[in-house]
Image (cartoon, rainbow, N blue to C red):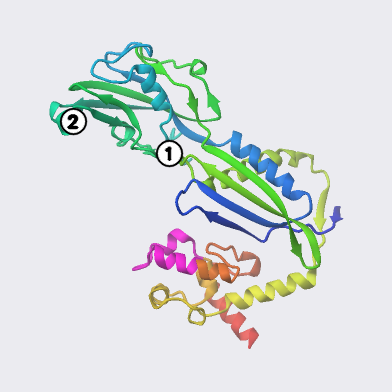
């Protein structure tokens, strides 16, 4: 038997303002929460963001002719200790896809570095070796490719190798236990956490006549190895995973009261929006023509599509996509909506909308 609880207010949509100057910063606003739940959710997300997200990092380097980290390198201004400190600042990006075999396994990147006299002469006798030059052709994306690793003053040809691992948190060099460690391989302290800063605060917001509901505002800054939007998405899923372990205690189920009248009005309003024709909303001629060529005639047919599918349409680009997303947001809609609970699927969307129009008339 289910136990009935009162209705909980939950956010109907989340607003994300990403910094135009940096993909690593974003402001996320979710409202309304029941009073107190802003802090409950905000604090949990903040702790997960700062401790539990994964990213790749360099954990070792080996350079031909260099046996340990407390030594100089012939023809290089910086000593090995300085080079290692620079490598610690290196940022690599990769989101392992679960279908790939061993996608999270440790990787070794080899590089034959060759600096000629001609390269030195073109740069006034000093050639700056950057992170992008050393790792730019690997399977990892280099977030800060212009970062200086060391400066060469003589022609040289050296074999270098770097080991990259994907983990979470901070791991000191002495904690790595590498079975295949080379004799001249130098281990590096690694910071895997891609989140640099998380602030959250809670404001009052209004729902009907109730003025003390919670508005949760999250401000997230990453180092570029993942975006702020990805960080929040991953943190939410990690939180849900850990709460789900308590499902086995669910010997009784609770249901929640719903405002049926309000729910019915919201449903009718949504269905009315879905039945609108594309020509009835203000879109540019280019966007309208692209949707017409794709045989998308109504809002329901549009919102059921995902972003990647939209970009496959002929002559359809980012500008048109952003215009459509902005227009849908004004209407309280978005791409990729699941309309199954309204009886609308990809297979029957045209027939369903036709029935809606007929019933409204």
Quickly name the residue at label 1.
Answer: 93
| Residue at the farthest front position | 124
- Residue 278 appearing in the image: yes
Disc 2 target residue: 124
Instruction: Please state if 142 lies on the left or on the right of 217 as rendered.
Output: left
Mark 2 lies on a secondary structure that is loop
Q: Position of residue 34 (x, y in %)?
A: 77, 55
Residue at 18 percent across and 27 percent down: it is 125
Disc on the earlier residue, 2 or 1 = 1
Q: Residue at x 39, y 26 (%)?
A: 86
- Asked if labels 1 and 2 touch by Cβ distance under 8 angstroms, the answer is no
Near mark 2 (Cα within 10 A), the count class, few <14, some 14-19 or many ≥20, is few
**Residue at 74 percent of width and 42 percent of height:** 247
Residue 322 is one of the magenta-drawn residues: yes
Q: Nearer the viewer, residue 338 or 319?
A: 319
| Vertical placement of residue 300 versus 84, above or below | below
Q: Position of residue 270 (x, y in %)?
A: 64, 73
Range of magenta residues: 305-325
Nearer the observer: mark 2 or 1; the answer is: 2
């Amino acid at each position: 038997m289910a136990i009935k609880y009162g209705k909980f207010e939950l956010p109907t949509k989340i607003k994300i303002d990403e910094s135009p100057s940096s993909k690593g910063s974003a402001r996320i606003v979710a409202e309304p929460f029941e009073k107190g739940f802003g802090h409950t959710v905000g604090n949990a997300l903040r702790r997960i963001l700062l401790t539990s997200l994964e990213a790749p990092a360099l954990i070792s380097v080996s350079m031909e002719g260099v046996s340990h980290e407390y030594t100089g390198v012939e023809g290089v201004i910086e000593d090995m200790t300085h080079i290692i400190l620079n490598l610690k600042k290196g940022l690599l990006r990769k989101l392992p896809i679960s279908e790939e075999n061993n996608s999270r396994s440790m990787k070794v990147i080899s590089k034959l570095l060759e600096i000629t006299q001609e390269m030195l002469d073109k740069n006034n006798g000093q050639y700056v070796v950057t992170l992008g030059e050393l790792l730019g052709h690997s399977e990892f994306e280099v977030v800060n490719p212009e970062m200086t690793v060391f400066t060469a003053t003589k022609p040289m040809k050296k074999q270098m190798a770097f080991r990259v691992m994907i983990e979470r948190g901070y791991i000191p060099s002495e904690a790595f236990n590498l079975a295949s460690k080379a004799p001249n391989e130098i281990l590096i302290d690694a910071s895997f956490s891609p989140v640099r800063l998380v602030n959250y605060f809670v404001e009052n917001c209004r729902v009907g006549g109730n003025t003390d509901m919670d508005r949760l505002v999250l401000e997230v800054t990453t180092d570029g190895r993942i975006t702020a939007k990805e960080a929040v998405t991953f943190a939410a899923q990690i939180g849900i995973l850990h709460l789900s372990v308590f499902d086995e205690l669910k010997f009784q189920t609770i249901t929640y009261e719903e405002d049926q009248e309000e729910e019915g009005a919201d449903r009718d309003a949504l269905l009315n929006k879905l039945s609108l024709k594309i020509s009835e909303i203000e879109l540019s001629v280019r966007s309208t023509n692209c949707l017409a060529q794709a045989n998308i005639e109504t809002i329901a047919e549009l919102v059921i599509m995902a972003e990647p599918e939209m970009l496959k349409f002929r002559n359809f680009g980012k500008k048109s996509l952003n215009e459509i997303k902005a227009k849908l947001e004004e209407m309280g809609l978005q791409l990729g909506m699941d309309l199954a609970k309204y009886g609308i699927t990809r297979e029957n969307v045209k027939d369903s909308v036709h029935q809606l129009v007929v019933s409204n008339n």
